[in-house]
Image (cartoon, helix red, strand yellow):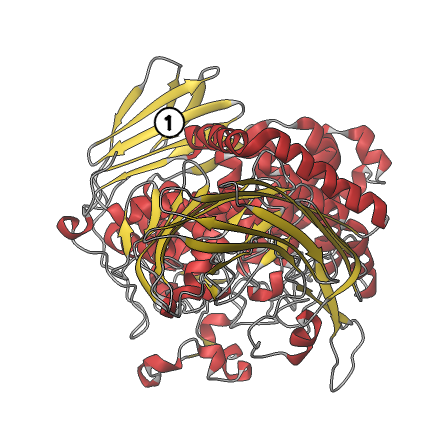
């Protein structure tokens, strides 16, 4: 996308300088606005043309059956798919009776700008109708961070070449016609007209629609109100049908006298509340928005983002694309989570319907780490949602004959909805991913109240799962059999290293937390004997290792499998899962995405530096990166093992996953975890951020900064227990500055450093070790970044 000539590279915005219908669907994803509760794709105001129209509410979905040719005990019975709810962003335009459709007539100018500091999507255009009338169109759009249920648009139209009759139709539209969906016909059936009308209303400038989903029984309401500014000839009428509520504004305009429409939209939904309650909710929300006014919403939005960027911004000097990309990434990660409030963070956020809108383990492993260090107030919400789904997870464990809780691999409402159990049910590591996300949050914030309730419950139930899933052999070693790790090209394996290490951390953390909160331990039925059993399993956890190769095994016996024939695999056959049977992938040494590498990133103190170097080199030669989750992890370990140029290349892949549409599916929504991986690659990779053990807990921060030669400076801020620490790195030194809070002890390349507010500390950056660069599978080397002279295309401000 940003390599397309119509996109510019700028540090604080994403700008498209002309309309390109060939990348319209992709641009709708990158220009999407959200607050974690409401999501609006970046569709054109007039509704058409579009790639994929989309308005989403976090959690609103429809169910569909998951039929099996051969039934089996424990198979999920129904799937869940995020649906397009009532679209409130449509404002159709007619110019002397000609519908404004940019596929017709002429478009001499068109620009869209997503401003990361204001949170506003702006658009300006000139359109010449088929009969030669020229109008100027401008709009601004926001989804509010401060009024959770509210989105708003300012739309203005002005004739440029003489008197013109204008009609503007502001609409709420349910069951919007969608493009034909390829793939699963069950999903297509669930998303085709999923909303059943319950109420429609239109009066004066106010609109409202209330609908209900057929199977999931969720009630969805949308309301809108308007402010209209125009000449004396301006008139409006309101009308409604079951699926459309419309305000039509007409005016006779002359140059210099535009028509201006301010549209306030409010959303609400519930699976329990009555129709009057839901429609009153949205009426109240839209009334509050009108009272605040457009200028008030804009000011509040800017103030919210000013506070966010003060603690989250990453400054990059030497590569303008990466500077733009990391701010784009942080903005969208924030949008995915800011006001989700006890809901999941879907893999695509609320930017598209990719993955059916499901939440996966990458929320806890990629997105929440970034938010923990940049916007920690947003982290409890998705973890409370996991906590709220504990009853379903406990029931799933009982169904599988296990103790504790088994969290789903993919879901919207909390029940497993993956029909393919080797990648779904067997991916038990999700349980430790969730537990350790809670531990990370508490360690970095000191939120003991959260730990005492939500954290303890999650840790106890997941620890019980591991203790029942695994077993001790005759020598007392604890094994966990029949699991699928992060690498989905290996399945139902014994002792997946990542799973075992994360389970070990989970078990130890659970034993620690019940010791700190004995009264809660008693409430949930944990006694000393159970906690001792967790510690014993953790201390005896199997760690597969090949002595002859000197590397850890991804799973027991993995290094003895036949290697995949990469030389005989043509480039067009990637991703492999679309061209080869899983049976063949499962029995070969070929890796979809980082697995042992991710284990080294998540559990760094389980490996020596030499083990990291050998492991990284071995698995680098097997990893094909058929997943957007891989590049960021590989960037971190490449940086940690001294391969800075390779780390820089992987940073570029993670950062440009959507901006450059590297996997050719950005049209379906953004890859939120890969966006988070941009921050991870910069901060954990080149900044060397790690959590270290102190007093038995991983709450001491360490940094081991080194920059690739292409970057002259990287600076970032992390939140640590109520403090903000700024780390500023160049090629020769790192500066640690405490922005606010009590003195903080950190590690710099293993050396303890105490930082006090107002007294920055400088430390030299040691040179990277000189090692042979590891090789990748044939044709799978990451694309190199441009030279510094090419990358520095725009000055920083």
Query: Which residue occupies the foreground of this view, 391 or 203?
Result: 203
Residue at 63% x, 30% y: name it. 291
Q: Position of residue 98 (x, y in %)?
A: 46, 66
Residue 612 appears anywhere in the view:
yes
Query: Which residue occupies the foreground of this view, 685 or 385?
Result: 385
Q: Which residue is mark 1?
A: 726
Residue at 57% x, 32% y: name it. 293
- Residue 547 in which image quadrant: bottom left
Residue 542 appears anywhere in the view:
no
- How packed mark 1 is, by other alpha carbons closer than 10 Å (few <14, some 14-19, many 20 or more), is many
Q: Position of residue 542 (x, y in %)?
A: 58, 57
Does residue 28 appear to the left or right of 20 in the view shown? right
Mark 1 residue element: strand
Residue at 32% x, 46% y: name it. 324
Q: Position of residue 259 (x, y in %)?
A: 47, 45
Vertical arrangement, residue 62 with respect to residue 322, above or below: below
Q: Which image quarter is the N terminus in?
A: bottom left
Q: Position of residue 636 (x, y in %)?
A: 37, 49
Query: Which residue occupies the foreground of this view, 434 or 327?
Result: 327
**Residue closest to the far left:** 789
Vertical arrangement, residue 12 with respect to residue 753, above or below: below
Q: Which image quarter is the C terminus in?
A: top left
Vertical arrangement, residue 187 with respect to residue 739, above or below: below
Does residue 530 appear to the left or right of 623 in the view shown? right
**Residue closest to the far top:** 758
């Amino acid at each position: 996308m940003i390599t397309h000539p119509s996109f510019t590279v700028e540090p604080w915005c994403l700008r498209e300088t002309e309309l390109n219908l060939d990348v319209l669907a992709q641009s709708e994803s990158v220009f999407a606005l959200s607050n974690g509760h409401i999501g609006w794709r970046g569709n054109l105001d007039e509704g058409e043309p579009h790639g994929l129209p989309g308005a989403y509410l976090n959690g609103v979905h429809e169910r569909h059956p998951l039929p099996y040719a051969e039934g089996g005990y424990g198979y999920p019975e129904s799937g869940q798919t995020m649906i397009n709810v009532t679209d409130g962003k449509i404002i159709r335009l007619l110019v002397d009776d000609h519908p404004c459709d940019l596929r017709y007539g002429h478009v001499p100018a068109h620009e869209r700008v997503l401003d990361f500091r204001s949170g506003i999507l702006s658009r300006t255009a000139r359109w010449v109708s088929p009969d030669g009338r020229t109008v100027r169109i401008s709009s601004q759009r926001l989804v509010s961070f401060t009024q959770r249920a509210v989105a708003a648009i300012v739309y203005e139209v002005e004739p440029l070449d003489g008197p013109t009759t204008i009609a503007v139709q502001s609409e709420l539209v349910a069951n919007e016609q969608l493009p034909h969906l390829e793939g699963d016909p069950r999903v297509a059936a669930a998303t085709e007209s999923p909303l059943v009308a319950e109420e429609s209303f239109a009066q004066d400038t106010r609109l409202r629609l209330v609908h209900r989903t057929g199977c999931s029984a969720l009630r969805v309401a949308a309301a809108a109100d308007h402010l209209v500014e125009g000449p004396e000839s301006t008139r409006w009428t309101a009308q409604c049908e079951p699926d459309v509520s419309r305000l039509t504004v007409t005016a006779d305009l002359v140059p210099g006298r535009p028509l201006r429409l301010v549209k306030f939209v409010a959303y609400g939904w519930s699976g329990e509340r009555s129709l009057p309650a839901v429609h009153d909710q949205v009426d109240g929300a839209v009334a509050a928005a009108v009272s605040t006014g457009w200028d008030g919403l804009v000011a509040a939005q800017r103030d919210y983002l000013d506070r966010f960027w003060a603690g989250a911004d990453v400054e990059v000097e030497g590569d303008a694309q990466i500077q733009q990309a990391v701010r784009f990434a942080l903005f969208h990660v924030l949008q995915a989570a800011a006001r989700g409030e006890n809901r999941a963070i879907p893999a695509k956020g609320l930017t598209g319907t990719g993955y059916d809108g499901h939440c996966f383990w990458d929320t806890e492993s990629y997105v929440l780490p970034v938010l923990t260090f940049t916007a920690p107030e947003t982290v409890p919400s998705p973890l409370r949602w996991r906590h709220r789904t504990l009853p379903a997870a406990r029931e799933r464990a009982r169904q599988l004959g296990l103790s504790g809780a088994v969290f789903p691999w993919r879901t919207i409402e909390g029940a497993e909805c993956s029909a393919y159990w080797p990648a779904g049910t067997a991916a038990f590591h999700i349980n430790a991913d969730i537990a350790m996300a809670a531990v990370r949050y508490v360690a970095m914030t000191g939120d003991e109240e959260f730990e005492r309730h939500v954290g303890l419950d999650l840790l106890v139930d997941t620890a019980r799962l591991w203790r029942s899933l695994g077993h001790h052999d005759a020598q007392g070693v604890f094994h966990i059999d029949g699991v699928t790790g992060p690498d989905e090209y290996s399945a139902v394996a014994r002792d997946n290293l990542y799973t075992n290490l994360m389970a070990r951390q989970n078990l130890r953390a659970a034993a620690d937390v019940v010791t700190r909160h004995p009264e809660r331990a008693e409430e949930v039925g944990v006694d000393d004997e159970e906690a001792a059993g967790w510690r014993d399993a953790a201390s005896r956890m199997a760690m597969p290792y090949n002595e002859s190769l000197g590397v850890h095994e991804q799973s027991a016996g993995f290094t003895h499998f036949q290697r995949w024939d990469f030389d005989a695999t043509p480039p067009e056959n990637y991703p492999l899962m679309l061209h080869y049977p899983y049976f063949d992938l499962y029995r070969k040494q070929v890796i979809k995405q980082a697995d042992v590498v991710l284990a080294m990133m998540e559990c760094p103190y389980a490996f020596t530096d030499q083990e990291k170097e050998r492991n990284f080199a071995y698995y680098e030669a097997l990893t094909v990166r058929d997943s957007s989750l891989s590049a960021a992890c590989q960037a971190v370990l490449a940086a940690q093992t001294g391969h800075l140029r390779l780390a820089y290349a992987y940073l570029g892949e993670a950062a440009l996953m959507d901006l450059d549409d590297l996997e050719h599916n950005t049209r379906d929504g953004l890859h939120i975890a890969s966006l988070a991986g941009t921050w991870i690659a910069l901060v954990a990779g080149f900044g060397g951020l790690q959590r270290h053990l102190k007093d038995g807990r991983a709450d001491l921060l360490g940094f081991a900064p080194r920059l690739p030669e292409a970057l002259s400076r990287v600076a970032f801020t992390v939140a640590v227990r109520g403090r903000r620490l700024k780390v500023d790195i160049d090629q020769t030194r790192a500066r640690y500055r405490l922005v606010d809070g009590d003195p903080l002890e950190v590690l710099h390349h293993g050396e303890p450093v105490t930082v006090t507010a107002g007294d920055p500390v400088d430390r030299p950056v040691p040179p990277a070790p000189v090692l042979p660069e590891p090789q990748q599978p044939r044709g799978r080397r990451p694309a190199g970044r441009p030279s510094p002279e090419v990358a520095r295309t725009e000055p920083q401000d």
